[in-house]
Image (tube, rainbow, N blue to C red):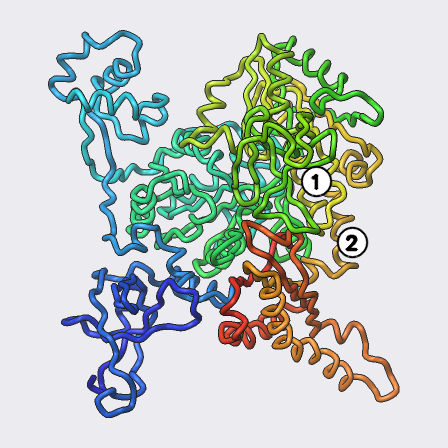
Amino acid sequence: MPADVSALQVALPLPLPRLFDYRSPEGVAATPALAGCRVRVPFGPRELVGVVAGVAAPAGDGAAGGMPELREALACLDAEPLLRGELFDSLRWLARYTHAPLGEVLATALPASLRRGEPLPDTHAWAWRLTEAGATSLPGLRAGSRPRRLAELLHEAARDEDALDGLMDDWRTAARSLAKRALAERVAIPASQLAPAPQPGPEPNDEQAEAIATLRDTEGFAALLLDGVTGSGKTEVYLQAIADCLARGRQVLVLVPEIGLTPQLLSRFRARLGVPVHATHSGLNDGERARTWAAALRGEARVVVGTRSAVFTPLPEAGLIVIDEEHDGSYKQQDGMRYHARDFALVRGKALGVPVLLGSATPSLESLHNARAGRYAHLRLSRRAGEAKPPRVRVLDVRKRPLDAGLSAELLDAAGKALDAGGQVLVFKNRRGYAPVLLCHDCGWSAQCRRCSTPLQGTPMTVHAGGRRLQCHHCGARQPVPLACPDCASLALQPQGIGTERIEELLAQRFNVVPVLRIDRGSTRGKDALGKHLDAFGARAGVLIGTQMLAKGHDLPNLTLVCVVGIDEGLFSADFRAGEKLAQLLIQVAGRAGRADKPGEVLLQTHHPGHPLLQTLIAGGYHAFAEEELAQREAAGFPPFAHLALLRAEAKHADAPMQFLQAAKNLLLPFAAARERLASRAAPDDAQPSPDNSRETLLELHGPLSAPMPRRAGMHRAQLLISAANRRALHGALDAVVPALHALPEARKVRWSLDVDPVDLY
């Protein structure tokens, strides 16, 4: 190739820490303007879609023997870059911070259809209208049926799909029925350009008003922690801040931790803001997610609400980023490219020069530490909005007391009284299934997952479907319950322990005159299933049984009693974050009670009523717990007073991960030893190295060790924990070592990953 022609440096979605050089396609000049465009390229016998990261002069000419002739890219897929400006720069930063290949990071940021090379979709809106035949046939449709109700709505006027979401449940099924008979049709309409016209909300109290004023006066980037008790009206603060931002003609991104929260927020936001609110989450199909991404890129989407991956939404006219339930662990991606959406949103906010609002009733200890250090503005909402009062909390000591499906007689009596008074009851158990173990009463055999157990550590399979099916919650393996014990042929197989299905069975028998609804991952698999279940449940007296899905953000105004069972296992976990997670979960669950005018009560059922965590939470609340936990973290050298990276490896044979991690440790040892050399040089000859001085350059290596769960899905797992008191020291070591990890001979025998700032060590 001519020496004066530049090569395209293409980032491909491969686990390789490099860019690949290609000649530009025929008729396309290789200029820096192509950076951020997608290209289709040959890669071995395959074709891949990558992103141009830049252009550079080749090292030599293949014809002259200086370098092999570059392969030509097959096509440039974009007339202008999809990834550009702030988003492209922020993604480059993310690749450096996570030490992940740039190609994988860029692929993660694009919707699936764009990763496949499909064109940027049209972003017009969709509406439904009656056809002439539909208007004529309207009187003949069955009265009260869904098609008739939808036809009546469309007879008044054509309705866009966002409006129909708020006017009628399950209207899409009715629309398909009408469309089949040519009575209604879906039509494209221009994307709505409604001016911001927020509807008036409730009058904010003085704390809410102060938070809103602070946000209104904030110019440029600032991180603001909205620390408000459950039911204090944080969403109202979000809405007013968003309305102010829209009035200035700017875009807003709102992150939520769970898909289940999205429909509830969308309907509330659409009613209040007067503009289309776009959603993006894994419950939508590829086309819907790509349209939201494209609408944001073109500046048409003014408000985008989504889960973790929504943090990659383009924001050319950004004005505000909101992170609801900022403490939630689901913001951390646990496989592939391991990023934290909350932390990346802060990076983007700084690059965009816009405020980032982090809201929670139980802020993460990292965020509280940043607020106390002055890095975040700390906005407090210390009381519930309106007339709602905090719930009364009681601890039920169940030691030596008989339990029925894990529930005490006192708890069942309290539930009956709440139902008799017309209230709703939530029984919280953070373990789905019927029972966690199937046990042979005669010989002690228990059902273990063959893919996740080791000779030294078994992994029980959970009993589901009322005792008819076994399922591993780690790898997903399923099998029927055996008819007899495989070891002794006994028929005395008994489910041991309690799950949500078993509690549902008991409560449905005991309270058979009210609805009993179970909410967990097994019962909410369909699209918008959680919202539909709660809508059908309504405000009537009834019982909800749920896992942590119900602990986040759901407003149940008639819920008067919350019963928390099965918390004891969380009190004694080896995970250093276990106390924080349990405290957050208890506060969030308890906060579902008494959110309207009816007083609420919370019952905590436990065999350890004197446990310090419970005593601290009851006596002083979450912030008293946080004070104690932060002091313990500082003394132990755990985050936020240290910075961690976890190197994980897995393989079919147990020795391969340990060999790879030992080789990785050998590469890191010089950086750990550097601390001793630096401390020795800084100290007088007759003095011991100062612990304070040495800690500034501390790099500690723990392992390699078997993972807390040493086998999963047939793969043996091990890990190496890297800890540093200084973030720069940690990343300096990783910058030097990670490229060498790819070249290790041992790396070819394992699947490995690096997790910077891990949220758990499992």
Residue placed at 31% from the left, 79% from the top?
56
Looking at the rendered structure, the kind of residue marked 1 is Ala
The Cα–Cα distance between marks 2 and 1, rounded to whole angstroms, is 15 Å
Residue placed at 40% from the left, 32% from the top?
527
CB atoms of marks 2 and 1 within 8 Å: no
Q: Secondary structure at mark 1?
A: helix
Does residue 57 show up?
A: yes
The residue indicated by pointer 1 is 583
The residue indicated by pointer 2 is 632
Q: Is residue 595 above or below residue 637?
A: above
- Could you say which is closer to the camera, residue 731 or residue 49? 49
Going by the image, does 240 lie left or right of 385?
left
Looking at the rendered structure, the kind of residue marked 2 is Gln
Q: Report the label total.
A: 2
Q: Is residue 160 above or below residue 726?
A: above
x, y (%) of residue 394?
77, 25
Q: Is residue 215 above or below residue 528?
A: below
- Answer few, some or many: residues within 10 Å of disc 1's Cα (few below 14, many 20 plus, some between 14 and 19): many
x, y (%) of residue 443?
74, 34
Residue placed at 73% from the left, 83% from the top?
677
Residue 115, by quadrant, is bottom left
- Answer few, some or many: residues within 10 Å of disc 2's Cα (few below 14, many 20 plus, some between 14 and 19): few
Residue 277, by quadrant, is top left
Going by the image, does 96 lie left or right of 692?
left
x, y (%) of residue 195?
31, 38
